[in-house]
Amino acid sequence: MSFIKEFKEFALKGNVMDLAVGVIIGGAFGKIVTSLVDNLLMPLVSVFLNGANFTDKFLVIGHSDGKDYATLAEAKAHGQNAFAYGAFLQSVLDFVIIAFCIFLIVKGMNRLMKKKEEAPAPAELTTQEKLLTEIRDTLKSKN
């Protein structure tokens, strides 16, 4: 089998195509969820936290010039090493919110796609039904 033919068979398998579609849809869906978090949910969370913005929480580490910096960007602009714990906390909070949103969407999709339950297996025949079946089969074989 030639290399090109083998690659063609691999690339056109259903699983590979399904995976490609899933990755593309996942990327687009990620943008939607990120926008939901950044533009709708985080402003609401900020209201409940009295306008707190975690991204600007930091500590200057190492050699410091003794100035107090209001923002992380300002400290970095002056060449300071900063332990940006607020940005990490913001990322963790974003992750939790995104994961919860995805959980709710997947749960809803699973509910919509729920397969019909299989029909229950037929009940086992009683002794009387087994005997009647044998009698029927015996009568059929005599005729």
Image: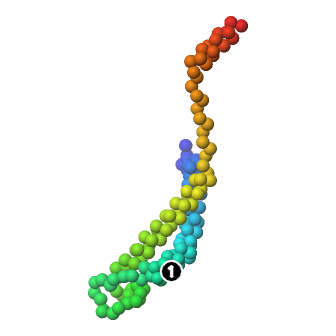
Say which residue appears at 56% left-offset and 76% top-offset.
39
One can see residue 4 in this view: no
Residue situated furthest left in the rendering: 63
Q: Under tag 1, what secondary structure?
A: helix
Q: Which residue is mark 1?
A: 47
Q: Position of residue 64 (x, y in %)?
A: 29, 89
Q: How many tags in the picture?
A: 1
Residue 119 picture quarter: top right
- Name, please, the residue furthest toward the right: 143
Kindly indicate the quadrant of the structure image that contains residue 122: top right
Q: Which quadrant of the rendered structure holds the N terminus?
A: top right
Q: Residue at 39% x, 82% y: name it.
A: 57
Amino acid under disc 1: Val
Residue 18: x and y in percent read 58, 53
The x, y position of residue 136, in whole percent, is 66, 13
Relative to 2, residue 127 above or below: above
**Residue drawn at (63%, 15%), measured in percent from left and top?**
132
Q: Quadrant of residue 81?
A: bottom left
Q: Nearer the viewer, residue 31 or 96?
A: 96
Does 133 sit left or right of 69 as displayed?
Answer: right
Q: Residues within 10 Å of mark 1 (few under 14, many from 20)?
A: few
